[in-house]
Image (cartoon, grey):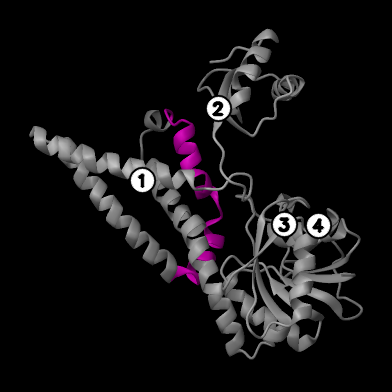
Amino acid sequence: MEDVLVVGTGVIGTSVALALTSHGVHVYLRDTDPAAARIASSIGAGAVREPPKTVDLAVVAVPPALVPDVLVRLQAEGVARHYTDVASVKARPQQDASALDCDNSRYIGGHPLAGSERSGPLAARADLFDGYHWVLTPTAATGTETLNAAFELVAMCGAVPVLMEAAAHDRAVGLVSHAPHLVASLVAALLEPAEERMVSLAGSGVRDLTRTAAGDPDLWVDVLGANALVVADLLEELSEGLDGAVLGLRAMGATDEDKRGSGARVVEDLLRRGRAGRARIPAKHGTVPEQYETVTVMIGDQPGELARLFTDASRAGVNVEDVHLEHSAGRPTGLVQLSVARELRDVLATALQHRGWRHR
């Protein structure tokens, strides 16, 4: 692959462009917002001009609803030999593009499962996709050369290719991304009218649960609109579980002992099923989940403290698998939770204690 046209210089399109330019690919940028394209170019994502000749691949990085029109227009211009997109919904754009007489032999849908709550080219990184899945949705009409071009794109971006049918992909992302985003927004919306002193008590649990609610609402309206029926079905399933939880909790608050016991069993069953589902989530972008132990360390708010902590862990010969930082409300200290292999938990705790760290 020698040259690529990237249409759309948001965080995903610009990150694709940065990854490609790092491999020496000539990247050309196009965006309806000239300022965004200029910013992407200024950080090394490519050139804001039309390609002098037909490029090897065109990457359409626009909202799902716009993909069909942009794709067909690009094909009419003959700007590339092969075409793909990076939209987070696949079935509807694919169907709409076919209705517009898209040449499906030279087009393959794609979706890198990586991103950021931040938007725009300044949030882009060349390593954004490293180790993440990148779903490709070929059809019976997809040409072999087009499929190979998509594989090469994924490889240059450091991602792991996964082949799926478009409808299966949309059900999957609805389950693991779109429906959870709405749930996070529903929970976060409860905080908006709450008293300040109530919200001030928020800890890591509610922060983790509502993290994705910080995303761009305009962007998410486009995403959810393209996958609306799938997400609606999933939320309907969720609502049945919520109804059961409400009934169980009300029974737990009853004066009758039998009702309290019955309600407790309902809630316990829900919690157990939730724990079992959580355990199925892969670790490290697709690897089998492992059981880790946590070492919780108190840390000051001085510059360099976190780096010093990681350095001391490294000197102890312990690899930190995951990290979570929680600030203490109103105090210049925080807690850092270091997840490590179970057999190394005591090794790390002892080593950090010898180096003056306080841990729980």
Q: What residue is pinned by disc 1?
A: 273
- The residue depicted at 70 percent of the width and 80 percent of the height is 107
Q: What residue is pinned by disc 3?
A: 159
Q: Looking at the image, which is closer to me, 173 or 79?
A: 173
Q: Looking at the image, which is closer to me, 345 or 299?
A: 345
* Badge 3 density bin: few <14, some 14–19, many ≥20, Cα 10 Å: many
Magenta run includes residue 210 = yes
Q: What residue is pinned by disc 2?
A: 293
Q: What residue is pinned by disc 4?
A: 19
Callouts 4 and 2 close, C-beta under 8 Å: no
Question: SS for tag 2?
Answer: strand
Question: SS for tag 1?
Answer: helix
- The residue depicted at 48 percent of the width and 43 percent of the height is 279
Instruction: Identify residue type, mark 4.
Output: Ala
> Where does the image place residue 355, in percent across and percent down from the top left?
70, 10
Instruction: Identify residue type, mark 1.
Output: Arg
Callouts 4 and 3 close, C-beta under 8 Å: no
> Where does the image place residue 163, in percent across and percent down from the top left?
63, 68
* Badge 4 density bin: few <14, some 14–19, many ≥20, Cα 10 Å: many
Distance from disc 2 to disc 1, alpha carbons, whole Å, reads: 22 Å
Q: Read off the magenta span.
A: 200-228
Q: Give the main secondary structure, helix, strand or loop, of the magenta stretch.
A: helix
- The residue depicted at 75 percent of the width and 51 percent of the height is 125
